[in-house]
Image: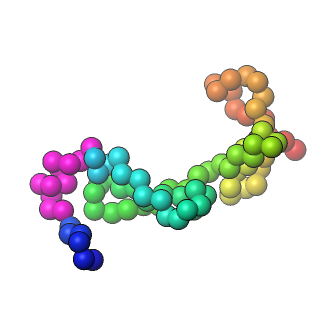
Amino acid sequence: MDGYRTLNFQEIVANQQSILALTVPVSDDPADGTLRTADGSNAYQFKPALTYDAAADTFTDTETGTVYQDNGKGPSQPATAIP
């Protein structure tokens, strides 16, 4: 790709923290996730596991569709699934 080149191992090691901090959006839609790397050579797509509905103040599991509502017990207790 014009204007880009592959880093060699020494360059990856020298810039490891910056490389690991990179997050590249897949699209303009946050639900599509981001690309990140754990080794500087491969990218992996990360997608959010939950979506937030501000109007209902709930979170929905993106895979199962289970809707969760804060149970008021704080972060140490799991949220309550809405039947």
Q: Can you say which quadrant of the picture contains the C terminus?
A: top right
Residue 81, position in %: x, y?
A: 79, 40
Viewer-side residue, 26 vs 45: 26
Q: Is residue 72 left or right of residue 20?
A: right
Q: Residue at x 70, y 46 (%)?
A: 52
31 over 54 or under it: above or below: below
Residue extending farthest left = 10
Q: Residue at x 12, y 54 (%)?
A: 10
11 over 59 or under it: above or below: below
Residue extending farthest right = 83
Q: Is residue 74 left or right of residue 17?
A: right
- Indicate the quadrant where residue 58 lies: top right
Q: How many marks?
A: 0
Residue extending farthest top = 73
Magenta segment includes 34: no
- Indicate the quadrant where residue 11 lies: bottom left
Q: Is residue 22 left or right of residue 32?
A: left
7 over 77 or under it: above or below: below
Q: Which residues are magenta?
A: 7-17
- What secondary structure is the stretch in magenta mostly built from? helix
- Indicate the quadrant where residue 5 lies: bottom left
Q: Residue at x 28, y 62 (%)?
A: 41
Residue 56, position in %: x, y?
A: 82, 42
Residue 72, position in %: x, y?
A: 76, 24
Residue 32, position in %: x, y?
A: 57, 62
Q: Is residue 14 left or right of residue 73?
A: left
- Identify the colour scheme used: rainbow
Q: Residue at x 27, y 77 (%)?
A: 1
